[in-house]
Image: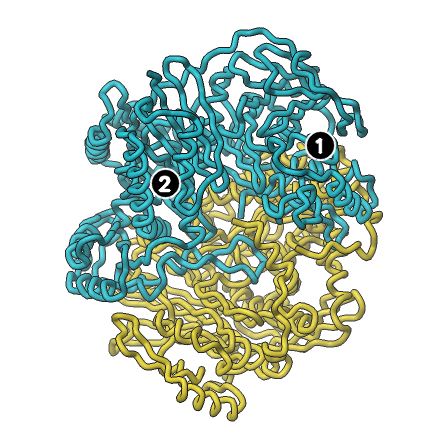
Amino acid sequence: METATAPSSGVGDLRNDPITFEVLRNAFKSICNEASALIERVSYAPTITEGHDYSVSILTPDGRLVSHGQRDQAPHMGTFEASVQNLIREVTEFAPGDAFIYNDPYTGGTHQNDVKIIRPIFWSGELFAFAIALCHWPDVGGPMHGTFNPRATECYAEGLRMPPLKLYENDEPVKPIWDLVSMNIRVPKERVAEMHAQHRAGVLVEERLLGYVEKFGEDVMRDGFEDTMDHSERRFREWVSRLPDGEYEFEDWGDRDLGKEDEPPIRVHCKMTIDGNQVTVDWTGCDPAPVASWGFARPALQSATYDGTMHCFPELAPLNHGVVRAINIVSKPGTCVDVQEPTPVTGYCSGAYEKVDAVTMACWGQALQDVDPRRIHAATVNLQNFCTGGIHPKTGAGFVSYMWLEGGQGARAYADGNSFYMMIFIGGASNQPNETLERWYPMVYTSTEAVVDSCGDGEYRGGFGIWRSFRATGDTELVVLGDRERVGPFGLAGGTNGGPNMVILNPGTDQEENLGMFTTKAKLKKGDQLEFGSNGGGGFGLPWERKVESVLDDVMDELLSLEKARETYGVAITEVDADALVYEVDEQETQRLRGELAEDGRPRGTGPFEVNELGEKLFRDPGELDTRGGTPAAAATKGHG
Amino acid sequence: MRKLRAAVDIGGTFTDLVAYDEDGQELITVKTPSTPPTFIEGVMNALEKAQIKPEEIVTFKHGSTISTNAIIERRGANTGMVTTKGFRDVLAAGRANRPDLFNSNWDPSPPLVPRRHILEARERVDYEGNVLEELNEDDVREAARKLKLRDIESVAVAYINSFMRPDHERRTKEILLEELGEGAYVTTSSEVLPEIREFERTSTVAANAYLMPVMERYIDSLLDSLREWGYQGEVYVTHSGGGVVTARAARSVPARICHSGPAGGVVGGLLVGKHAGFDNVITFDMGGTSADLALVNEGEPTLAPEWRVDWNIPILFPAIDLVAIGAGGGTIAWVDTGGSLRAGPQSAGADPGPACFGNGNEEPTITDAHLYLGRLNPETYLGGDLEIRPDLAEQAIERLADQLGLSAPQTASGILRIANANMTSATHLISVERGYDPRDFALVAGGGAGPLHAVEIARDLRIPQVIVPPTPGVTSALGILQVDLRHDLLAPVLQQVKDLDVEALAQSFDHLTAEATEILEAEDIPDDRRSIELSVDARYYGQTPYMNLKLESALAGQADLDALVAQYRERYESEFGYQLPEEVATVEIVNARVAAIGLTEDVALKEDLEGASADDARAGERPVYFDETEDFTDTPIYDRAKLGASAELEGPAVIEQTDTTVLVPPGATAKVDRFDNIVIAVSASGTAPEAKAPAAAAKGG
């Protein structure tokens, strides 16, 4: 639990009494959770019902974020302020029962697949709030199944872009608009379920919010919105003021710009300045916008910065405008984190989002080293977007599948990263069961198992990545848009980077081919075998200082090879009888090996990006960090089953 | 000689016994301390304390937390697993998701079977049940050899798509039993619960294997003790779905026995409601650390198809649909750095307990707030065995009040309002959000703290009545007394109605019904107490969650199927407010289910016909704080033990009894019915009192 200290700016700042305030703050969260649960229950396709790729939020009439669902997706909600603010600019007249469909990434979003339905909510004739319900639609048209397009050099080659369009009037669908949408996307029939689900989620938010207005009165409710934001801002600024003033810099790299001839890596750089309780996050040092689909527009930059911040201060959840307005974000239009139309953006999440998020956390981590080092996190598995599509040989019907892989969590300054961990920014998302996918799509899955040795190494290692593989039972098109096959998730304080993301066609045969993270229109034939492997998480601290028992445990679980145990961790293990699980550690040899490694000074792999130099320099050895204390973050967890 | 039906609820702290005298229609209730780790001594103590003779007992039912605790405390068997080659990490990967969006310090709980003991066999069945690769029996023998070397006591078998074709799992079990020899435990995912989704099914069978040896030892020693004492009859064990199975049957499905405590409480609430004249009740049980809420519609508790021991350990058995939230007497109130008053999630539990216990916790809890506001009597709280220090509660509240800049009474009442709002929100979730109107329900309050909060929660949701049973502390044992014997069987269907082979479905039902009949036979249920219930799980094709629809009989033809689809669409519309058009989504039948039920004779409680006046139960008065007046008011105190049938009183009032305290706020009236339940009309005037609003905190996790 947080220490109960008197707040810096005083309780008197609340508009409502502290009891009413807490009741309403909780109410906003719970309304969003209920609406999210509704979407989960009534929408369509494994992406949404099994994968949880959706979000619901409440915003003020001028487009400030009040609350969101507890298991929603951070990339979505961080763009909702831009979405509503643009909606208000574009549409001047709203009426009860209206709802607007909207997915334009440049003015208000992430990428085209994230389709929002926005509902204005009225109380006695006046605009009272907005509700947004977003689902990732598995396809919104364009040349590729699933809309992701690694080869696009313009957004026009990705998918359908929609400005805010009135999709519902008096709570009835506006047919021409729906027809326009459904004529431009694949399997539109399935999306009717999402349209209903997202619309109903907005209705539910409206009913619940207005129920509270009836009880508390309009003024108390509007004050409740303001108090909720002020409260978050106060707590956030209180945190910032405890951190040492100064500049904190970090950088990371995207693998390649596919649109340029030499496919150069893409640099993401952050300079965070802390001055008292003010923080400025400056992204102007980032590389220019790539030609291919990797970067994002400004709304998603904000979203990624908020997500990285919230992971360092999780007790501030849910995210709202209080935190948003307390962070000054600086970017240069035309860079990879502030791209302009028509630079493509479908790959924003596996590209820039993941990097900005991790780099933001690494900057906060430096500032937190002396204050609460348990909040330092090495980088976690990078998203790979997989789309398959075609005609199902059994049903003759078209299909599009969108999925992703979990992988290794980055090590923490006091503990290993967890294995088989959902990407850091979509903790509410799930993997999709093989048994469900096989029933829907023409493929037989052949594995769900750890990628051996994929952890980033360290005194605390990153989590392990996972293989999920399938055999095609019909002809299928494949699109992959990911990242980090070259630059693994970074380690810190001497920890190495996690293992690579991989997509391998027909492994172990003479047709074996590494398709890589930017695959377009690979045609899988019936019988083709495809293996997807994901990143391990980055490590923390020096591998040869890892506890010998922990290394042995990983060996016994067959997650770590004897070779890696010896070469990287300096632990000499002999397999006496693996069947009976009898292993021996040669202690003398271990001491010798570890002595050698320590003398050598730094863990090194073979590739150009094995160790992040800033991660090595800027972070202290775990031995020097006081990581014993409990953190609010740890305490906050106890409340959950 | 008396004919007694005995029910025992073994909790972590107390073992409760309720025995029903069939002839005298009377209840005997006893509470004794539990005796971990075996708990059996506590059961015997309870029987002795109740002065029951073994030959008087006609049935003996009991519920226990032993299997749930064995998982939570990781005291299960050394367990291994055999799975399809390539799928070794299905169990550890789980669904890879997290309860909290931003909390990177969260860790999933360790899997019940470590990776090193998960071994693989070559085999593969496709989604339709066709064999793609035959089972490699050598792989299984090799796995058995390794598991034997490692002293593995229990083995789970979980193959991909085994729910569509269990042959490979069955054969694997045979080989393992053969190779591992005498005393080995083997359980397969398709026999435990043949349902789609590999992780959830694997998790269930892993828990089952993990618990089998523990459960067997426990049941053996319980039976030994009871036999030695002289009881020779059947022993029943409660399960998560609100039923019992025989001790014999429980040995093979211990994962089913988990989570049975709350189920007893809900059935107990149902029974209380029934006697008080309500078929629709919401049960609300609030103890030291948490509050459980569940809904009973027309006498039937709502069931969920799965539940979780922990975030990443789901168990795929039907379970009473319970919302548990972290609000109990020990829940700690604090001020965060943004200046907001918070209640929970931390709890001081029973040890150190609330500040007023004087055991080292100095932070104010919900119990401290009640004590400060005059609602609890320090002399008689918890039977008066504990020394309660009101001064410590006051100091704790005052410290918090200073931080907030509020008065101490405002602070104490604020803590309770926040907790109430969270519980109201949870109640909203299980009622309004599922299509039920709270105005049609009564709230049955139990637990040491429930009756202190019930009226406020009922008012917020416009629930008209609150019922407080005479002994709210033993509601769970009372429920166990009443639960039916129930086995749930399932066969996967997974076909859209447009392609559905009605005859094949009818055959599935025939098989399940035959199996159900065999079970009832084996459980010695007489013909006139047997009931077999058929139902299907249905959803729009494309969705994941499904609804359970009861059937009068197996589907005979297209007309029955059409009626079923119509029923689904109607339910869907009432719950979600719209239907999906036929051309967009057809209905899919997910599972065929059959429940084999051995009906328990109703407990008919004796009526208390003596008219009594509340005045006879007056035990003085003291100042008690109420929000309605925003002040302390001299409030009459009543002794529940002396409050007879038909006694009536008006709020404000406090009714004290050994195991709980009932708060009757201003505007509410309480009346004792002929079964000694207190039935509170929450607002005499019919107008809802102003703003004490519902709010927040979603379902646990």
| Letter of the chain shown cyan in the rendering | B
Q: Residue B85 — which label?
A: none
Q: Amino acid at mark 1?
A: Lys
Tell me where residue A425 appears, x and y as whole percent: 56, 61
Q: How many residues crowd mark 2 within 10 Å: few (<14), some (14–19), many (20+)?
A: many
Tell me where residue A207 appears, x and y as whole percent: 63, 34
Label 2 SS:
helix
Q: Amino acid at mark 2?
A: Ile
Tell me where residue A316 appears, x and y as whole percent: 67, 56
How far apart in space, not on screen, are marks 1 and 2 (Cα)?
Answer: 39 Å
Q: Is residue B23 left or right of residue A259?
A: left
Instruction: Judge by depth and name the residue closer to the eye, A464 or B233.
Output: B233
| Letter of the chain shown yellow in the rendering | A
The reply to the same-chain question for discs 1 and 2 is: yes
Q: Is residue B537 above or below residue B75?
A: above
Return the residue at label 2. Answer: B257
Residue B589 quadrant: top left
Label 1 SS:
loop
Q: Is residue B396 left or right of residue A362?
A: right
Residue at 62% x, 49% y: name it: B346
Residue at 70% x, 69% y: name it: A371
Instruction: Judge by depth and name the residue closer to the eye, A441 or A477.
Output: A441
Residue at 53% x, 51% y: name it: A54
Residue B623 quadrant: top right
Tell me where residue A597 appears, x and y as whole percent: 48, 89
**Is there any visible trace of residue A300 in the rendered image?**
no
Instruction: Judge by depth and name the residue closer to the eye, B7 or B334.
Output: B7
Residue B154 quadrant: bottom left
Foreground tag (1 vs 2): 2
Q: Residue B692 — which label?
A: 1
